[in-house]
Amino acid sequence: MGAEGQGTCPSVPSLLPMAYPEGCPTHPAYPAGHACIAGAGVTILKVFFKESFVIPDPVEASTDGLSLLSYTGTPLTAGGEVNKLGVNISIGRDTAGVHWRTDGIEGMKLGEAVAIGLLRDYSSTFNENFSGFTLTKFDGKKVTIK
């Protein structure tokens, strides 16, 4: 192949849908590892923080990015914000061309399931009285750990 259609790396075409000149990673795409970790981490965070807690006085960047303005949209909750964090971590790899949407979505579900299983296992080892707690899964269903 001639010089036309070449990226910065001579062996990689410019039209390759990857942000990395070395090409595809050497691991499977499904499920996305970053998404599994994000799903598990977000699930654990929901245990430590009250999901319905409304974040007081949130701010957002101005259109020029030089100042902060009061956020006036719908109230931001701790649960909603950690869910957004998880999605940003998992779906963000799509833009790099490393994963597809299904890799991230299913990875987050897998991480969530593992975290819930771990929490259930740990709850049976507590010496003190444990009345349990409830958290909201990514699909909107509530799950109680006792």
Image: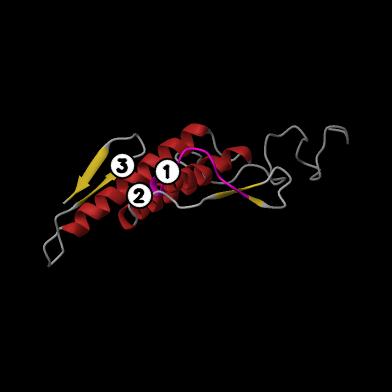
Along the line of sight, which residue is nearer the eye, 116 or 132?
Answer: 132
Question: Residue sitting at 18 percent across and 58 percent down?
Answer: 123
Disc 1 marks which residue?
80
* Residue at mark 2 to residue at mark 3: CA–CA distance: 9 Å
Q: For residue 137, what is the image quadrant?
A: top left
Q: For residue 109, what is the image quadrant?
A: top left
Within the magenta stretch, is there residue 78? yes
Give amino acid for label 3: Thr
Give amino acid for label 1: Gly
Which label lies toward us, 1 or 2? Answer: 1
Question: Regarding mark 2 in the picture, which secondary structure is present there?
Answer: helix
Disc 3 marks which residue?
136
Q: In the drawing, what numbered circle is on residue 13?
A: none
Question: Residue sitting at 77 percent across and 35 percent down?
Answer: 13
* Residue at mark 1 to residue at mark 2: CA–CA distance: 12 Å
Disc 2 marks which residue?
43
98 sits left or right of 79 in the view: right
* Start-end of magenta stretch: 69-79
In this rendering, the answer to whether 125 lies above or below 32 is below
The residue carrying pointer 2 sits among few (fewer than 14), some (14 to 19) or many (20 or more) residues within 10 Å by Cα, namely many
Along the line of sight, which residue is nearer the eye, 53 or 46?
Answer: 53
The residue carrying pointer 1 sits among few (fewer than 14), some (14 to 19) or many (20 or more) residues within 10 Å by Cα, namely some
The percent position of residue 54, horizontal first and vertical second, equals 40, 48
Please, which residue is most extreme toward the bottom here? 127
The residue carrying pointer 3 sits among few (fewer than 14), some (14 to 19) or many (20 or more) residues within 10 Å by Cα, namely some
* Residue at mark 1 to residue at mark 3: CA–CA distance: 10 Å
Question: Are dots 1 and 3 in contact, CB under 8 Å?
Answer: no
- The numbered mark, 2 or 3, whose residue comes first in the sequence reads 2
